[in-house]
Amino acid sequence: MTTGTHNGENPVRIVFMGSSDFAVPALRALAQDSRFEVTLAVVQPDRPNSRGKKIVPLPVKRAAEELGIPVYQPEKVSSEGEELLREQDAELFVVCAYGQILKQNILDIPKSGSLNIHGSLLPHLRGAAPVHRAILNGDDRSGVTIMLLDAGMDTGDTLSEASVPVTETTTAGALHDSLADIGAGLLLRTIPEYLDGRITPVPQDADRADYADKIEKTEGCVDWTLDSGAVVRRINGTDPFPGAYTMLEHGGKTVKIKVFSPEALPGFKGGDAVLGTVVTADSKEGLTVRTGSGAVRIGEVQLPGRKRMKTSDFFKGNSIVPGTILGAQQA
């Protein structure tokens, strides 16, 4: 691999590897910039949707087809795929939310290496779910890092980064979308500087590294014994996926109700109320729940098979009796 090889007269030839929504802004940005030519989009195979029935094209495939970019969808990049990748005569591979770790022989194909857009400030939160974990951990900042890929798990030298604040109202969905857009813009600035030799790759400090494990659906279960701030982070950090939930007696049966848009009330005095007790439940004061320290006011809820709605609207046709204890059992 060498840097500074591009002559600047022709567009930079790029193979893009990505699958999920997070990668789409970067693909679109590259495809719409005349300095670059995306010759191929490598995407994971289409999978059944969440209901397990209909096969749904992945977001990067849909975007690539809309942009007129050829798509290749291998289960794994084999020797056949390696030959196809070499035929692209690419200056760079750009990898973003592809969903597989690539072997070094693949990463070494392009003349100037393989770049990755990662949704954290490396070496903090390497791994699968940095966006969710930043909120769940209570980080006050998150960001995007552009790095050179190697065969490790987000261990390559970094080229550039951009940071954003994380507030008590930031959700995983909002942070995901923000970082995807920021990463696309950062990529467009980084590639020319990298190819011109104006960026010196910086090795990561392995001693400062930590990891963002994959989010499990059960992590959406709200533990009302936590303090109000931790409950808010749990709800926001799993919004919209997998979604925070609690168990509620409703209509004569126990149902899983999803909760969103929380507000911490750390100074709330709950007296002897059991943790998880509904303190207020009406369209005026909303849904307030006693927590390990203080309380949390819930701004939106969603019943099974129903749309997400504001609690003020929910209480126009539904009722929850104050004193009801919300369950924390997993479901």
Image: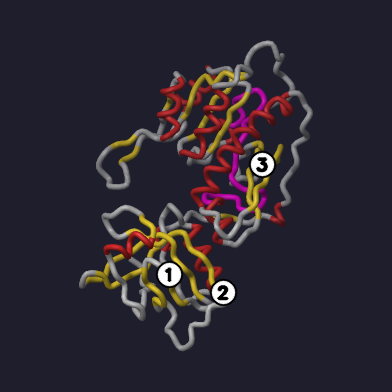
Q: Position of residue 23 (x, y in %)?
A: 51, 36
Q: Is residue 81 above or below residue 217?
A: above
What segment is highlighted magenta in the picture? 107-129
Residue 156: assigned label: 3
Q: Amino acid at mark 3?
A: Gly
Question: Which residue occupies 54% across, 74% down?
Answer: 227
- Residue highlighted by disc 1: 285
* Quarter of the picture holding the C terminus: bottom left
Q: Nearer the viewer, mark 2 or mark 1?
A: 1
* Quarter of the picture holding the N terminus: top right
Q: Position of residue 318 (x, y in %)?
A: 28, 66
Q: Nearer the viewer, residue 36 or 235?
A: 235
Residue 255 shown left or right of residue 167 in the figure = left
Q: Could you give the CA–CA distance between mark 2 and mark 1, rounded to whole angstroms? A: 17 Å
Q: Is residue 37 above or below residue 203?
A: above
Q: Earlier in the sequence, mark 3 or mark 2?
A: 3
Would you say the magenta stretch is mainly helix, strand or loop? loop
Q: Secondary structure at mark 1?
A: loop
Q: Nearer the viewer, mark 3 or mark 2?
A: 2
Q: Secondary structure at mark 3?
A: loop
Q: Earlier in the sequence, mark 2 or mark 1?
A: 2
Residue 60 shown left or right of residue 251 in the figure = right
Q: Residues within 10 Å of mark 1 (few under 14, many from 20)?
A: few
Q: Nearer the viewer, residue 127 or 308?
A: 308
Q: Is residue 231 above or below residue 16?
A: below
Q: Is residue 296 above or below residue 141?
A: below
Q: Is residue 128 magenta?
A: yes
Q: Amino acid at mark 2?
A: Pro
